[in-house]
């Protein structure tokens, strides 16, 4: 075949470093992990066991109780984010983008600050504030006459997970706020002016004009929240330790994976079951992302200006 | 007239809500920083008071500097973050240029392949990554962290930068080609300087998770010599949990560097977002 064009080496040179690093450190280990979940240690080293690890994880009461507990907790963790973080983020962005608002840059910068802090800082700061010993939270509730409402929220089985989810919401509300803010700013003035001409202002303008236009951004935020939540680990590990206490009530898939893979106290680390849990998480995230791409994103109407 | 009053009331309400939320966002940071400068008794007696000459005390900071190897941890975090950031930006921009500038077979597929990593977290590969690092003797080295973070940052960098590079004028690049510039010169001399705002956005989004990550330092490089600030303060706080002065000082020291970097970059950040990368 007579080559019409010489092979363009520069394309390969431009692509090679990124593709090599990405493939070697991310894609290969990902498949390595998926593969590892099909094996287990038996007589004479590694034995292929097919899907038996998954049967153990989902069916064996010693494993499945922890797994379903972690999955349920994770789902609740995600639900709290969807119900609190994203609406608050949208509301803040809507306020920030109102025309002629003074100090918008200051508010934006300040509200985003928790997002840049590490989980270690966030976890300990809130632990200190909610601590019954130091007592900033009880003291403050006392000042407004609500002292009876205080409880060691992080230490109770019933409230620990929700408290942690709300701390995480506090930390990350800046992200939906920024993205929605950007989307609101990109709505052309003509659209808003046309709405005003028709007498659509204030709240109804937000609900009828702006909200439909930013729905695609809300969709992206939801899926980012989903992936982030089902992959979360640090906040729980920092505040409650690898055991995700009290009594595993704050255990989510990330901490479950960590404990299984590395072991803790009396349990020995098990790379094969660890890989099995990682694969299950991979499946859950993949399901969520495909559900979003095929069922939701297609129905979102996009407007071009 | 009534319209004007109406809008004043509305903007007052908007300010009230925003101020309230700003207080909620900043309050915990404020409490930690002011208390880190107080003596032990004042911390407990009145946690919300700012330090006065009587209650001012740097004992927490002295403990942190004497006990923990925080200078070393800072150095490690800095090396890891800067090196990963450099590779993410360089490799990411190169790949983004290839994808946005040239038409070749498999362009779309390559773009999708690289974008996969935005949705699938690299943590799920941890088991195999650790085995790989053990096999290659990279456990407890900063190199392992730089490699992992480079791979982690690339997908988003390629995605955002290629969106931006599509906006760089073709005429400019073609003028360069007519003048006999090589494709490499066009990329480094013409295109890179033009996408600098986008690079800043990518830099912030890449830097924050790397600096704050606990998972990979804990798993790949937990040795004393390679601890990052995040892991170091986590361990330090665990050991000094009853020494409140030291804990608060360590937290304040960990907050400061990110805060400064963020305030420097924050203007670029919002400009980068609103310029249309993430819509």
Image (cartoon, rainbow, N blue to C red):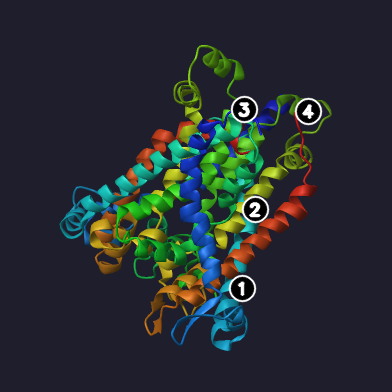
Q: CA distance from mark 1 to mark 4?
A: 46 Å
For the N terminus of chain A, give its image quadrant: top right
Tell which residue pokes out farthest to the right in this image: A198
State whether residue B100 is above or below residue A175: above
First-in-chain label (2 vs 4): 4
Q: Which residue is mark 4?
A: A196
Badge nearest the viewer, 1 or 4:
1
- Tell me the residue at 47%/64% (across/down): A233
Badge nearest the viewer, 1 or 3:
3
Q: CA distance from mark 1 to mark 3?
A: 57 Å
- Tell me the residue at 65%/30% (across/down): A2
First-in-chain label (2 vs 3): 3
- Do discs 2 and 3 share a chain? yes
State whether residue B156 is above or below residue A60: above
Mark 1 chain = A
Quadrant position of residue B250? bottom left
Q: Which residue is mark 3?
A: A5
- Give the numbered dot on residue A72: 1
Q: Where residue A177 appears, x then y in whole percent?
A: 58, 44
Q: Disc 3 vs disc 4: Cβ atoms closer than 8 Å?
A: no
First-in-chain label (1 vs 4): 1
Q: Is residue B187 left or right of residue B146?
A: right
Q: Disc 1 vs disc 3: Cβ atoms closer than 8 Å?
A: no
- Do discs 3 and 4 share a chain? yes
Q: Is residue B57 left or right of residue A87?
A: left
Q: Where residue A225 appears, x then y in whole percent?
A: 59, 55
Q: Disc 2 vs disc 3: Cβ atoms closer than 8 Å?
A: no
Q: CA distance from mark 1 to mark 2?
A: 18 Å
Q: Which residue is mark 2?
A: A222
Mark 3 chain = A
């Amino acid at each position: 075949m007579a080559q019409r064009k010489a092979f363009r080496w520069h394309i390969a040179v431009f692509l090679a470093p990124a593709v090599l690093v990405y493939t070697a450190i991310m894609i290969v280990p990902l498949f390595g992990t998926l593969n590892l979940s099909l094996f287990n240690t038996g007589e004479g080293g590694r034995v292929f066991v097919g899907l038996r690890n998954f049967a153990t994880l989902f069916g064996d009461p010693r494993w499945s109780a922890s797994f379903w507990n972690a999955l349920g907790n994770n789902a609740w963790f995600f639900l709290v984010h969807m119900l609190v973080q994203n609406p608050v983020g949208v509301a803040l962005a809507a306020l920030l983008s109102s025309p002629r608002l003074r100090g918008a840059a200051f508010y934006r910068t300040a509200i985003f600050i928790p997002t840049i802090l590490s989980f270690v800082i966030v976890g300990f700061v809130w632990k200190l504030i909610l601590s019954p010993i130091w007592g900033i939270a009880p003291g403050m509730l006392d000042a407004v006459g609500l002292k009876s409402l205080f409880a060691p929220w992080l230490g109770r089985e019933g409230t620990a997970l929700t408290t942690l989810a709300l701390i995480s919401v506090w930390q990350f509300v800046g992200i939906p706020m920024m993205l929605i803010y950007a989307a609101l700013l990109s709505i052309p003035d003509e659209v808003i002016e046309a709405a005003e001409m028709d007498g659509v202002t204030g709240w109804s303008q937000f609900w009828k004009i702006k909200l439909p236009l930013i729905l695609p951004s809300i969709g992206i935020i939801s899926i980012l929240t989903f992936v982030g939540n089902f992959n979360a680990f640090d906040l729980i590990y920092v505040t409650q330790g690898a055991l995700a206490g009290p009594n595993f009530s704050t255990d989510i898939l990330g901490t479950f994976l960590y404990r299984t893979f590395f072991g803790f106290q009396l349990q020995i680390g098990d790379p094969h079951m660890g890989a099995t849990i990682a694969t299950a998480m991979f499946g859950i995230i993949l399901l969520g992302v495909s559900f979003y791409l095929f069922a939701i994103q297609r129905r979102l109407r996009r407007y071009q200006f | 007239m009534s319209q004007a009053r109406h809008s004043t009331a509305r903007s007052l309400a908007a300010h009230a809500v925003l101020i309230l939320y700003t207080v909620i966002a900043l309050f915990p940071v404020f409490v930690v920083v002011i208390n880190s400068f107080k003596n032990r008794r004042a911390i407990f007696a009145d946690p919300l008071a700012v330090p006065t000459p009587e209650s001012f005390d740097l004992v927490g900071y002295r403990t942190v500097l004497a006990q923990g190897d925080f200078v070393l941890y800072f150095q490690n975090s800095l090396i890891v973050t800067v090196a990963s950031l450099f590779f993410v930006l360089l490799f990411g921009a190169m790949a983004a240029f290839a994808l946005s500038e040239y038409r070749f077979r498999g362009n779309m597929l390559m773009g999708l392949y690289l974008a996969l990593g935005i949705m699938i977290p690299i943590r799920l590969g941890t088991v195999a990554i650790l085995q790989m690092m053990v096999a290659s003797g990279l456990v407890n080295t900063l190199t392992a962290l730089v490699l992992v973070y480079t791979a982690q940052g690339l997908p988003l960098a390629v995605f955002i930068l290629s969106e931006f590079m599509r906006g760089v004028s073709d005429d400019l690049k073609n003028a360069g080609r007519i003048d006999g510039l090589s494709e490499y010169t066009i990329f480094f001399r013409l295109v890179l300087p033009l996408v600098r705002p986008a690079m800043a956005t990518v830099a912030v989004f890449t830097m924050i998770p790397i600096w704050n990550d606990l998972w990979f330092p804990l798993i790949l490089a937990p040795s004393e010599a390679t601890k990052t600030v995040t892991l170091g303060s986590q361990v330090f706080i665990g050991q000094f949990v009853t020494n409140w002065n030291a804990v608060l000082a360590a937290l304040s020291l960990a907050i400061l560097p990110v805060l400064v970097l963020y305030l420097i970059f924050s203007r670029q950040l919002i400009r980068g977002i609103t310029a249309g990368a993430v819509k």
